[in-house]
Amino acid sequence: MARLDFPTYLQHIRDESRTFRDTLAGCDPGTPVPSCPDWNAADLLWHLGEVQHFWTWMIANRPKGPDDYPEPVRPRDYAALLAYYDDQLAGLVEALGSADPEDHAWTWHPDHKDVAFIFRRQAHEALIHRRDAELAAGTVSPFPPALAADGVDEVLDVMYGGCPSWGEFSPLPHYVRVDLTDTGDQVWVQLGHFHGIDPDGITHDEDDLHVVTDPGVEPDAVISGTAEVVDARMWRRADGADTHLSGSLEIVDRFRAIIHEPIQ
């Protein structure tokens, strides 16, 4: 699947973040966020503002990491939260717009240590939280199809896939193909098992998945739907009722069990 270019990611960050902000501006601060049960509208607004503050600082101070990061103080009232958020969005857009995507920067991902990772991740952070804001407000608008298609690949490859240096992924000969019916994209996933002992001495032994290139075999199962439907489902912002399943339901259930684990 072809990646979006960096100016396009940046425009999506602007657009999705502004829609997020405008949606929450019309909410009571105490409005529950159905997709984030522990949060209300004010908590959601603070969260994305804090996230954008964090990544702005990481870009501006690259390659310093979280040990040097100054934690922001949450504004007390909703108007101040909105103003704070406006400042963080402006800062993130400016920082990304003046940075070279290839520059080294701290990120939490073991394999992607550059500003490019932040461009992509923050576009999807804004998109998914825009959906959270709209669910709180009761008004849901469409995802941009190309961004949603990229989001399916990103959530499976980056958020659920990958392998830290202290662990090992053991692949199994089981494949799921995700077909995005409106964009024509496909994402192949290989199921397997992850095991290892993390730096805190905790043993991990669990089913896992990796995004792979087309292996040239028939998939065990196929999940299909529009890019928006599948992206929202992978992020548990929709129930997946509009997806279509075919092939081995046992493999589909194993895939579902993996993506139902919380994203850290």
Image: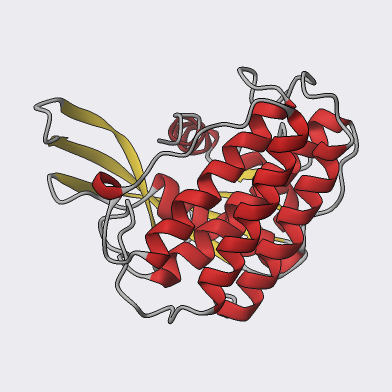
**Taking the image as drawn, is residue 230 in sight?**
no
**How far from the left and from the top, in percent, is residue 146?**
70, 68
Name the foreground residue: 112 vs 259: 112
**Residue at 32% over, 66% down:** 62
**The N terminus lies in which quarter of the figure?**
bottom right
Above or below 63: residue 72: above
Above or below 8: residue 180: above
**The C terminus lies in which quarter of the figure?**
top left
Q: Quadrant of residue 158?
A: bottom left
- Is 259 placed left or right of 247 in the picture? left
**How far from the left and from the top, in percent, is residue 135?**
80, 33
Q: Quadrant of residue 114?
A: bottom left
**Taking the image as drawn, is residue 26 in sight?**
yes
- Is 47 placed left or right of 79 in the picture? left
Q: Quadrant of residue 179?
A: bottom right
**How far from the left and from the top, in percent, is residue 13?**
66, 62
- Is 200 placed left or right of 20 in the picture? left
**Residue at 37% over, 44% down:** 70
Name the foreground residue: 175 vs 241: 241
Name the foreground residue: 43 vs 208: 43
**Residue at 41% over, 70% down:** 115
Above or below 30: residue 201: below
**How far from the left and from the top, in percent, is residue 254?**
44, 33
